[in-house]
Amino acid sequence: MNEITREVSESISHIVRELNYESGSAIPILQRVQERLGHVSPGMIQQISDLTGIPASELYGIVTFYSQFHLEPRGENIVRVCHGTACHLAGAERVTHAVEMATGAKDGGTSEDGRYTVERVACLGCCSLAPVVMINEEAHAKVDPDKVKSMFRQFEKKIHEAENTDEKPSEGKDHA
Ligand code: FES
């Protein structure tokens, strides 16, 4: 069971009160927790269960069923590597490896600095451009594993420039 901090616990109590659980379902509470705290950990699920009486197993079922919920914290930027058939044949495994090296995040995990989360996804619907990688909402076509490092360098540069002009490039949020 994950421990949760007092701040997190207070936020959850606040959300449950705010949504007046009696009149609603579990999903709005989970959505609000995901939105405010970035994920819904097992410890958070337990607290929601304690406060609402909804069985933790039911909450856990919802969180694991819907892709909008995440049991673990995610990175500031979400990198999705397509592993559909066309991308697989075009070298998605090599691309994934290169992405892991460039971001410091393991496939399916988040880098230690919290900067990137790397996920493998099914066909993104643009197979003629395989292999495809999405960094947040931006698609990168025909990705060459040897050029992945420079692709991320470019991305970081864009973020840096956007920060200096108060505009953000395609920033990732939730990917339900
Ligand atoms: S298989 Fe990757 S976009 Fe279709």
Image (spheres, rainbow, N blue to C red):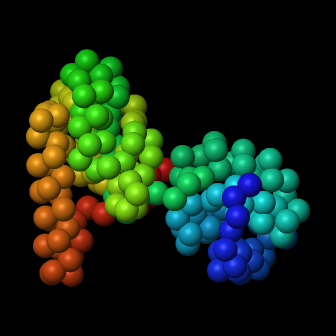
Q: Is residue 26 above or below residue 133?
A: below
Q: Which residue is depicted at the point 62% across and 67% down?
A: 33
Q: State whether residue 76 is above or below residue 124.
A: below
- The one nearer the camera, 56 or 125, is 56
Q: Quadrant of residue 49?
A: bottom right
Q: Is residue 164 left or right of residue 15?
A: left
* Residue 101 point in image, percent of width and height: 26, 43
State the residue at coordinates (24%, 71%): 168
Residue closest to the eye, 172 or 126? 172
Along the line of sight, the residue nearer the viewer: 17 or 79: 79
Q: Looking at the image, can residue 119 be seen?
A: no
- Spot occupied by residue 91 in the image (x, y as percentages of width and height): 23, 24
Q: x, y (%) of residue 54?
A: 84, 58
Q: Is residue 49 visible?
A: yes
Q: Please report the residue visible at 20 percent of the width from the left and 29 percent of the height from the top.
A: 130
Q: Position of residue 117 (x, y in %)?
A: 39, 51
Instruction: Looking at this view, name the residue that lies furthest to the right.
Output: 53
Numbered disc total? 0
Q: Work out which quarter of the rendered image holds the N terminus and state it.
A: bottom right
* Picture quadrant of residue 92: top left
Asked where in the image residue 17 lies, by quadrant, the reply is bottom right
